[in-house]
Image: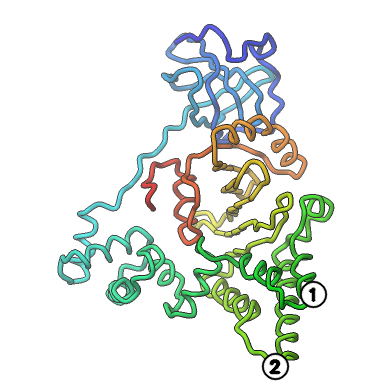
């Protein structure tokens, strides 16, 4: 296959440039085909655009049968000053929890093949719950007695050994679900005319501007935000006591939230960071997960961000960092125009990460649906890592 020109058509782009990036032999990188030249023996020399924007001539070990503009993964085998030698990495097919798997699980547990039991078995397989009789009965009972929770939310509670009661459900909804947020509690204090001025000022101080964050990144650390919220909570409590009032305020809600987070993993942090988007008071949602792979003991880190902006809408990002400090990012935006703006600025992100000793290997856009439920975050990360297809209703 031959492509006559390179998109964008500059003379600079049509000439191989020295391999200056930090990619090494063995790295798997997602690239874009720009121009292809057929070689002898079924090999192709392909001009590929790498995540940092550079275009390099690459000799592919296996035949490339795609077209200009296609994205695909390669594994780098070696490189010279003018060429890269690599092989195409084929995506693995998605394994599916089949009807047969559900039937086998029910048979092994010696339970009947009813519709309700099949639903519970499917949930166990889907979320990787322990396939025991006790867990199965717990799932069936929880689905039956908690109509206000989705099946995935039921699995979230059970998988993380969190008791399903009204207090925990209320806290879960406040800090994880979309309908109610910590932000609403804080803003209600500002808007309430009876709120003490000292308390209002403490809440307003919690919202950080972009300039403040840029000058002092530590102001948005989990510990710092948690400390400020606790100070507000104690101040609110002190004022209520002086007024002779007793309320279930932010302090109680925050302490329940902290207990809930610690209940399911010491390696999981989720918080909402109050920020100013222009004059609007919003919150950045941040989730951090640390996970150790059992087969090699190497640690991976996962970060989910939901960032409100003044002009571009909410931008979501899943960031995966491996033990070599290689980074893979997927951005989800509210429009294709916003994605194009991000793509146009990706070199600055690459350079910033490089200065911090990180290597950006892959950037994708809108490969995952927007509005990821936090309780299903690990599932979406797994799908993103494996580059598999998935049901967007998850």
Q: Residue at x 26, y 63 (%)?
A: 119
Separation of marks 2 and 1 at Cα, in angstroms: 18 Å
For this rendering, which residue is in front, 304 or 289? 304
On the rendered structure, is 122 left or right of 42?
left
Nearer the observer, 356 or 201: 201
- The residue at the point 67 percent across, 61 percent down is 273
Residue at the location (22% across, 63% down)? 118
Q: Classify mark 2: residues with Cα within 10 Å, few (<14), some (14-19) or many (20+).
A: few
| Quadrant in which the N terminus appears | top left
Q: Position of residue 16 (x, y in %)?
A: 65, 14
Task: Tell which of 271 and 277 is nearer to you.
Answer: 277
Name the outermost residue toward the bottom: 244
Q: What kind of element bears circle 2?
A: loop
Q: Residues within 10 Å of mark 1 (few under 14, many from 20)?
A: few
Query: Quarter-wise, where is residue 123 in the image?
Result: bottom left
Does 368 appear above or below 240? above
**The furthest residue to the front:** 193
Q: Residue 83 in the image: state x and y as whole percent.
A: 62, 18
Image side of residue 268 versus residue 133, left or right:
right
The reply to whether residue 172 is in sight is yes
The residue that disc 2 covers is 244
Count of numbered marks: 2
Q: Earlier in the sequence, mark 2 or mark 1?
A: 1
What's the coloring here?
A: rainbow
**Where is residue 223, by image quadrant?**
bottom right
Looking at the image, which is closer to me, 321 or 315? 315
Helix, strand or loop at label 1? It is: helix
Question: Circle 1 sits on which residue?
Answer: 197
Residue 361 point in image, percent of width and height? 61, 37
User: How far across and how far down the image is residue 82, in percent?
Assistant: 66, 17
């Amino acid at each position: 296959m031959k492509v006559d020109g390179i998109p964008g058509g500059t003379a600079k782009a049509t000439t191989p440039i020295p391999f200056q990036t930090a990619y090494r032999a063995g790295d798997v990188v997602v690239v874009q085909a720009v121009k292809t030249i057929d070689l002898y023996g079924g090999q192709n020399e392909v001009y590929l655009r790498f995540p940092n924007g550079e275009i390099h001539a690459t000799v592919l070990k296996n035949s490339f049968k795609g077209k200009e503009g296609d994205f695909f993964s390669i594994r780098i085998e070696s490189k010279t000053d003018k060429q890269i030698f690599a092989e195409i990495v084929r995506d693995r097919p998605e394994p599916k929890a089949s009807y047969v798997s559900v039937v086998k699980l029910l048979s092994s547990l010696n339970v009947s093949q009813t519709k309700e039991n099949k639903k519970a078995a499917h949930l166990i397989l889907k979320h990787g719950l322990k396939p025991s009789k006790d867990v199965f009965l717990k799932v069936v009972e929880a689905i039956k007695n908690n109509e206000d929770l989705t099946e995935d939310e039921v699995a979230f509670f059970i998988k993380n050994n969190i008791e399903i009661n009204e207090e925990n459900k209320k806290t879960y909804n406040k800090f994880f679900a979309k309908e109610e947020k910590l932000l609403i509690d804080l803003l209600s204090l500002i808007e309430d005319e009876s709120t003490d001025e000292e308390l209002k000022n403490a809440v307003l101080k919690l919202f950080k501007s972009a300039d403040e964050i840029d000058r002092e990144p530590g102001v948005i650390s989990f510990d710092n935000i948690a400390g400020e919220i606790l100070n507000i909570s104690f101040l609110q409590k002190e004022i209520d006591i002086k007024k002779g009032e007793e309320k279930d305020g932010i302090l109680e809600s925050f302490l329940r939230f902290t207990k809930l987070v610690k209940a399911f993993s010491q390696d999981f942090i989720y918080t909402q960071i109050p920020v100013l988007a222009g004059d609007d008071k919003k919150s950045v949602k941040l989730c951090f997960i640390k996970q150790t792979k059992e087969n090699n003991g190497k640690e991976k880190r996962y970060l989910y961000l939901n960032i409100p902006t003044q002009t571009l809408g909410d931008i979501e990002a899943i960031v995966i960092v491996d033990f070599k400090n290689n980074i893979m990012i997927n951005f989800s935006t509210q429009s294709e125009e916003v994605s194009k703006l991000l793509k146009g600025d990706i070199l600055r992100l690459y350079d910033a990460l490089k200065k911090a000793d990180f290597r950006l290997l892959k950037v994708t856009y809108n490969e995952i649906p927007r509005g990821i439920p936090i309780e299903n975050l690990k599932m979406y990360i797994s799908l993103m890592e494996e580059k598999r297809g998935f049901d967007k209703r998850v």
